[in-house]
Image (cartoon, rainbow, N blue to C red):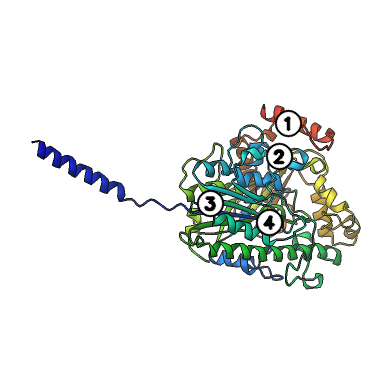
Amino acid sequence: MKLKTFVIIGFAFLFLSMKKKEPVPKQRPNILLITSDDHGPHLSCYGDQYIKTPNLDAIANNGILFRNAYITAAVCSPSRSSILTGLYPHQTGHLGLTTHGFRFVGEVTTIYQQMKEAGYRTGMLGKLHVEPESFFPIDYWPLKSPNYEKKDMARYANFASEFMNQSEEPFFLMVNFPDPHWPFIDVVEGRPVSPVKPDEVTSFPYIGMDNERIRKYSTAIYNGILRLDECIGELMAKLKASGKLENTLVIFLSDHGDEMAKGKFDVYEAATNVPFLVSWPKQLPKGVQSNALISSIDIVPTILDAAGISSVPKGVTGKSLLPVCKKPNMKFRDYLFTEKNCTQVDMYYPRRAVRDKRYKLIYSLLDEKQNMVAMRYMSAGPNSPIAGSANHQELKNAPDSIKKMYQEWLYPNKVQLYDLEKDPYEFHDLSEDPKYAKIKKRLMKKLVQWQQDTNDPFRFPDKLNKLTQEMDTIKVTKNMQWQYPHYLYGK
């Protein structure tokens, strides 16, 4: 009897041991998140005819290119806050630039906290530009400077290589390149190798005007993208040399659109539609494109999904992109939202926007006020970072349709409506056309519902009035102390 019991127990133990070994543990992927600074989809893989970007094209050819990818807000700190949390800026309180004193309000969970807790080695190269830094447990951060001068760009690939090869443990590395952020510099230390000249390009079409002055700005952005492409080529070569390319999820995007008319600081397509590439050779198909509406709030869920981490932070409404990477034509999202909050003191003009597959609605939150963003672009002096726009003098001789477009940017209707299929550069506001009344009503309803679902404090007139008063009266100092955390968020 004892022998029989012993045999039964032995077989049971053997069975359980064999059962434990059956599921082979999934090898956790490495994560390489790459951002560039201040540009739209002016890449050859997106069809741009004026420059060739072979290294970014290679990422697209080895993975998925998204044509309808958007950031949440078209300025650095708020946009990056969404990339790193999966939340809209109005959810985290990061309403503007850290250089103007904005930061997270209350407790916020970042992707760095989650990856560190999951046992990943964490690294960063380049600027974080989100506060407070204490929310980001980063093991390796040898280059903190934003490096807007674009000096010694070989450092990025070399530092990345050092980090990738430090251990066989999986890594999460974010590489933040400075191009083509202002100051616009055509060539730095021989980069790019083959720059373009103003007579070889045209001004970006959404500006509505092409002249030598504006073309110099477009040229500088193109050359910054060429320099960026060279650096990304060096970075990807280091990843391949490490032997870890096949099991590395690579995500590339720009943090927002061009610093040009209707671009950076606003909610138009030139501001919020960005290049977005994903590759993971071991798991995802290659050389495919998707028209799905995707957002930077989807990045955190995608990384967590790839890493096998099931807990998604509270309030995150984004979704993992891995299913749509595998089935690029699947239905993914019906409506997509973007926002503008405070930005900085002299750029205050809060707005909200929603788009579906074809139409886009923009809702301006302030009544009877000039759009300070448009005013500053159109009035910028020579050599200003925001002079890449038609100015008042140039508009005197412009066609009436372009004059009207700029006037509607400067003094927009409370609600603007655009047909992105017929009017991709948003020249013709349809909001007062009765033929589009139902579309306008439907999109406005969705926008209001989104504000409620994400607890947007800007939907309350009394809170918005207090914020407007503070924005109108606060002085720009080195250590700005805002009161909005108290009346907007009760913190």
Residue type at mark 2 is Leu
Residue type at mark 1 is Tyr
Q: Which residue is mark 4?
A: 177
Whether residue 183 is visible to the viewer of this picture, yes or no, is yes
Q: Residue at x 78, y 68 (%)?
A: 202
Q: Which residue is mark 3?
A: 171
- For the residues labelled 4 and 1, the Cα–Cα distance comes to 32 Å
Q: Which residue is mark 1?
A: 484
Q: Nearer the viewer, mark 1 or mark 3?
A: 3
Judge by depth and name the residue closer to the eye, 15 or 364.
15
Whether residue 275 is visible to the viewer of this picture, yes or no, is no
Q: Percent from the top left, x then y, of residue 365?
A: 74, 39
Looking at marks 1 and 3 on the same chain, the residue that comes earlier in the sequence is marked by 3
- Residue 168 badge: none
Q: Are marks 2 and 1 in contact (CB under 8 Å)?
A: yes
Q: Percent from the top left, x then y, of residue 77?
A: 70, 45
- For the residues labelled 4 and 2, the Cα–Cα distance comes to 23 Å
- For the residues labelled 3 and 4, the Cα–Cα distance comes to 19 Å
Judge by depth and name the residue closer to the eye, 2 or 485.
2
Looking at marks 3 and 2 on the same chain, the residue that comes earlier in the sequence is marked by 2
